[in-house]
Image: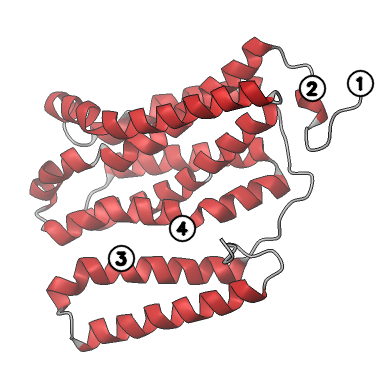
Amino acid sequence: MKPSSGIEPQVIGLDAGRRWGILAICCTSLFVVGLDTTIVNVALPTIGEGFRVGTRGLEWVVNAYTLVLASLLISSGAVADRFGRRRVFQIGLVVFGVASIACALAPSVEMLIAARIVQGVGGSMLSPVALAIVVNVMTDPKERAKAIGVWAAVFGLSMAAGPIVGGVLIESFGWRSVFWINVPVILAVLALTAVFVPESRAQQSRRLDLPGQLLLVILVGGAVALLIEGPRIGWFSAAATAGYVVVAAALAAFIRVESRKREPLMDLAL
């Protein structure tokens, strides 16, 4: 039987048990990514006391992760389509796991923020790539719709579970445990991925839009940095004014670059 267009030959004939097992593996990685978006929130007071840092420093502990995660999602998906989804997914697991260990061992808030940035890089390789893996193995439209429904439910559950799980862990083991909890889960997903998840690539992979990606990071990161640091440096200070100019220039350049790209990072027509 000839595989239909857009479906990798190695996923043809996968039994239902393995397909739903792959969904479970990918949903577990999504759960960890979503959990780390909210689990840290309940740890902030304890982290602040331990490192003697104020609110703005603590804001970066949260936003460093979510900013990098959101900014790199599209590019990570494009890289996976080109070089192999399972390969990029496994790299993302390793990066996320190592960064979680670095967060747990961080001796200062600056090191914690740096580790959270790396954690965001790893997370960006998990969420979109895992969904692409699921869509690739779920070839039946009805089964695929159910799988995406499960996917969405798991993400919502992970966001809601973060404060609850974090509260229990902090009360019992301290704030560093909210990062240590990731490690055994990541190791299990890595092992299961190697055994059960087939490699796949897009039939027609998109080109990487590096200028667009860089400008998007400057645009989003600069805007959020101004919101966080504005009260400290002054909304009309020289530093803030320079920040406004950089963000505005990045926005203008991003629109110009993306409107001229044949395969843009973000389709402005949307």
Q: Residues within 10 Å of mark 1 (few under 14, many from 20)?
A: few
Q: Tell me whether circle 2 and circle 1 mark residues in contact (CB < 8 Å).
A: yes
Query: Which of 191 and 138 lies nearest the eye of the viewer?
Result: 138
Mark 1 → mark 3, Cα distance in angstroms: 52 Å
Question: Which of pointers 1 and 4 indicates the residue nearer the eye?
Answer: 1
Q: Earlier in the sequence, mark 2 or mark 1?
A: 1
Instruction: Give the SS element for disc 3.
Output: helix
Q: Which residue is mark 4?
A: 71
Q: Earlier in the sequence, mark 1 or mark 4?
A: 1
Instruction: Name the residue at the right extreme.
Output: 1
Query: Which of 50 and 72 lies nearest the eye of the viewer?
Result: 72
Q: Amino acid at mark 2?
A: Ile
Q: Residues within 10 Å of mark 3 (few under 14, many from 20)?
A: some
Query: Which of 131 and 186 lies nearest the eye of the viewer?
Result: 131
Whether residue 3 is visible to the viewer of this picture, yes or no, is yes
Q: Which residue is mark 1?
A: 1
Q: Amino acid at mark 4?
A: Ser
Q: Earlier in the sequence, mark 1 or mark 3?
A: 1
Q: Residues within 10 Å of mark 4 (few under 14, many from 20)?
A: many
- Is residue 186 positioned above or below 47 on the image? above
Q: Position of residue 117 (x, y in %)?
A: 38, 54
Instruction: Give the SS element for disc 4.
Output: helix
Q: Amino acid at mark 3?
A: Val
Q: Which residue is mark 2?
A: 12
Mark 4 → mark 3, Cα distance in angstroms: 12 Å
Instruction: Give the SS element for disc 2.
Output: loop
- Is residue 220 positioned above or below 70 on the image? below
Instruction: Give the SS element for disc 1.
Output: loop
Q: Which residue is mark 3?
A: 224
